[in-house]
Image (cartoon, rainbow, N blue to C red):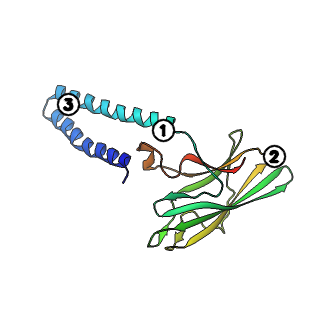
Amino acid sequence: MTVSKIVFFLLVALSVPILASIVNSLVGGRRRSAWMTLRVYLILVALYATFLLATTLALPIQVFSAYEAQYSDDWSIAVTSIRRVPHDLDEDYEVDFRMANHGAKPMNGEKNLAAYVLTEDGTRYNASPEPNDPPFDALVKPGKFVSTTRKFVLPTNQNRVELVLVHQGFRLGWFLVGRFPFDGRTVILLQK
């Protein structure tokens, strides 16, 4: 468990008795005591939120090379190959991924993981639906890997193309200070 998780869970654990104390003071008719406790609690929450926002904005975008793996515990994902297929005014980028299990028991990959491509001007291109390819949360046996492919349709003649793997939907990482796997602040450089 990381330090930022310990700090977050400590704050959550301290919130329960503090909020219970506030409710107890209100029920007991001690409104001034409840108000003072609530103000101190809100100041602590505001300080944590400010520190969280400041560190999130201050962290630079991390850039990986095209074939470098990203890890989440014993599970990893890496780009194994990139194929560019031009047609008319567009170009298909077919990206092959290798999802590996480095642990001792079977495990599923990351849930709600999505891949998209960013071009030099910041335009986002989502993957085309490919129902025959395994999802990112496919079961991977110990010491084995599963391959999958995603296809992106982009305009031709792009100077810089970056791949982003990110969790979709709610995630605990929003409330934790620091960098976390698949937080959207890491890019894989597919083309310079």
Amino acid type at image mark 1:
Thr
Of the image marks 3 and 2, the number of the one nearer the N terminus: 3
Amino acid type at image mark 3:
Ala
The extreme right residue here reads: 88
The extreme top residue here reads: 32
Q: Which residue is mark 3?
A: 34
Residue 29 % position (x, y): 13, 30
Quadrant hosting residue 144: bottom right
Distance Cα–Cα, label 3 vs label 1: 33 Å
Q: Is residue 21 above or below residue 107?
A: above
Look at discs 3 and 1 and give the one toward the viewer: 1
Q: As rendered, which of 141 and 27 lies closer to the eye?
A: 141
Q: Which residue is mark 2?
A: 157
Q: Are marks 3 and 2 in contact (CB under 8 Å)?
A: no
Give the SS element for disc 1: helix
Q: Are marks 1 and 2 in contact (CB under 8 Å)?
A: no
Of the image marks 1 and 2, the number of the one nearer the N terminus: 1
> What residue is shown at x 32% (from left), y 47% (from top)?
9
Of the image marks 3 and 1, the number of the one nearer the N terminus: 3
Q: Which residue is mark 1?
A: 56
Quadrant hosting residue 46: top left
How packed mark 3 is, by other alpha carbons closer than 10 Å (few <14, some 14-19, many 20 or more), is many
Residue 56 % position (x, y): 48, 38
Q: Is residue 184 above or below residue 110?
A: above
Distance Cα–Cα, label 3 vs label 2: 63 Å
Give the SS element for disc 2: loop
Distance Cα–Cα, label 1 vs label 2: 33 Å
Residue 34 % position (x, y): 20, 30
